[in-house]
Image (tube, rainbow, N blue to C red):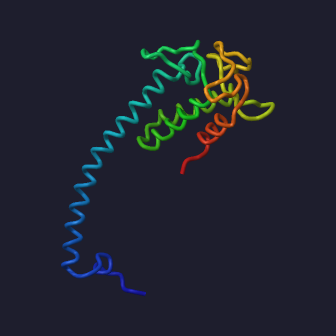
Amino acid sequence: MAAFSATSIIGGDQEDHSTRCLNIRHDKQLLLQRASRFKELYDIALHGFRYLKERMWDAQSGGWFRLLDRSGNPLEGGVKHGHGSSYAISACVCCYELTEEQACLELAKTAFGWLEEHAHDSVNGGYFVFYHRDGCPILSESFHGTLRDAIGTPIGCKDANTTSDLLKAFAPTE
């Protein structure tokens, strides 16, 4: 086994060491530039989280609204949708991983609990897709004058798209 020494860590002679030091200084400058970019991304992530929490999340009944108007008021009577909820949960978890802000993780957990209570089909498995503001699943074939959602699934039916995205949102991250 080779002896452990400063030369073995640095590798090479003094000239090589000088070159490495110059590279380290250059890398440090790049890291500082990237750190300022990271701060910008950090702020953007928290801005998005605040929007999810303060506008999209229903503080009265829980769950995320499906649609808002430009002023942030819920449309469609405050209807909620599982697909959007899956992305909102994932966004909260990603924001937590980036910022380590506990509020992000707490909202993701609260949303998971809300979906388990209101959206999970305990009889047949899976998750209902549309919910009234109070969390009751919308099971009728007609919803605001339409019979199908945006991807063609009959209103009241579960779909693989929503269920798979919810399961993905619930899965541990790596």
Left or right of 169? Residue 136 is right
Residue closer to the observer: 169 or 2: 169
Image spot of residue 83 (x, y percent): 60, 31
Quadrant of res 3: bottom left
In the current view of this chain or complex, which residue is farthest to the right?
Answer: 123
| Total count of labels | 0
Q: At 61% across and 33% down in the image, what residue appears? A: 112
Name the residue at the bottom extreme. Answer: 1
Q: Where is residue 32 shown, x and y percent of the image?
A: 25, 51
Whole-percent x, y for residue 99 in the image? 41, 41
Q: Is residue 39 left or right of residue 78?
A: left
- Choose between 126 and 153: the one closer to the eye: 153
Q: Quadrant of residue 159?
A: top right
- The picture places residue 33, in percent across and down from the top left corner, at 25, 49
Is residue 97 shown above or below 17? Answer: above
- Residue nearer the viewer, 8 or 125: 125
Eyeballing the image, is 102 above or below 114?
Answer: below
Residue at image x 19%, y 67%? 22
Q: Is residue 132 left or right of residue 6?
A: right
Quadrant of the image containing the N terminus = bottom left
Residue sitting at x 28%, y 54%: 31
Residue drawn at point x = 44 percent, y = 31 percent: 49
Of 150 and 66, which appears nearest the observer?
150
In the image, is residue 59 above or below residue 123?
A: above
